[in-house]
Amino acid sequence: MRGFQEIFDIAAARKGGAEALEEMLGDGPLSAQALAAIPEDRWLSQMTRCVFQAGFNWKVIEAKWAGFEAAFKGFDVGACAMMDDDWFDRLMADKGVVRNGPKLATVRENAAFLLELRAEGGAGAVLGGWPSGDYIGLLDMLKTRGARLGGMTGQYAMRFMGRDSFILSRDVVARLVAEGVVDKAPTSKGAMRAVQGAFDTWMDQSGRGLTQISRVLAMSV
């Protein structure tokens, strides 16, 4: 496995030099304090957006998002967790949303999940404060306790909320394969532990977080 600087240099050569690459990397993730301050309705909104984007044209979901916000009362967590059959039936007839029953049902389930997190410090504190050195633990928690938040859906939800994260995109996986970390897209717990170990090493070497390292890996391919 190459050191981070070697991979950075490969990416820089592809993107017009180190300075140009640094500009492309953008700012780092939000601080734990900033993430803890994000209202839980925004976490539910982003989770829902990512659930619906999976397997759908993202532009379609974006175009309908105002309708989603209205249909789910601004993603009020308490209200959504108590969604009754009448409300669900109205959603299934609402042209302002994508009328996919199983995905619509995830709003109620994920609202209940976020209610559970209140007893653990709140969504922002738990999801935003989870240590980057155990990011795969956070992804596993989202998969097991949330609804349809496994795989890329949970990864994108965390990235879009601004927390330190990696996304196992095609290009990132290609770099991980090239470095001998995995031999294919990681799905097993063993493969995910290998991925976490590689990112931990690169974090130690570079002083960067998961987000920027993930972007460098993607741009090195």
Image (spheres, grey):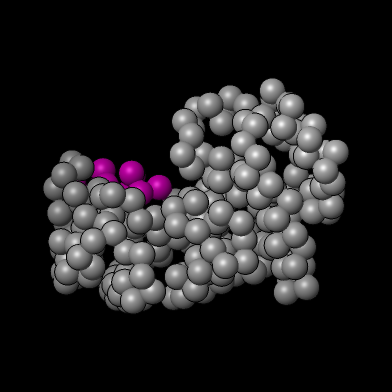
The answer to whether 123 appears left or right of 32 in the picture is right
> 173 left or right of 70?
left
Chief secondary structure of the magenta portion: helix
Q: Is residue 115 above or below residue 46?
A: below
Residue 124, magenta (yes or no): no
Q: Which x, y percent locates residue 60?
A: 53, 26
- Where residue 11 sits: x, y (%)? 20, 51
Give whichever of 50, 163 is nearer the camera.
50
23 inside magenta stretch: yes
Indicate the quadrant where residue 180 lies.
bottom left
Residue at horizontal 56 percent and vertical 31 percent from the top = 61
Q: Can residue 12 be seen from the camera position used here?
A: no
The region drawn magenta spans: 17-26
Residue pictured at 44% horizontal, 75% vertical:
133
Disc count in the image? 0
Residue occupying the point 72% across, 68% down: 117
* Residue 35, image quadrant: bottom right
User: Is 209 above or below relative to 57?
Assistant: below
Quadrant containing the N terminus is: bottom left
| Residue 88 image position (x, y, % from top left) | 78, 39
Q: Position of residue 80 (x, y in %)?
A: 79, 48
**Is 71 on the left or on the right of 203, as rendered?**
right
- Work out whether residue 182 can be spotted: yes
The answer to which of 143 and 49 lies nearer the viewer is: 143
User: Is residue 139 left or right of 77 when viewed as pictured?
Assistant: left
Q: Residue at x 18, y 41 (%)?
A: 16
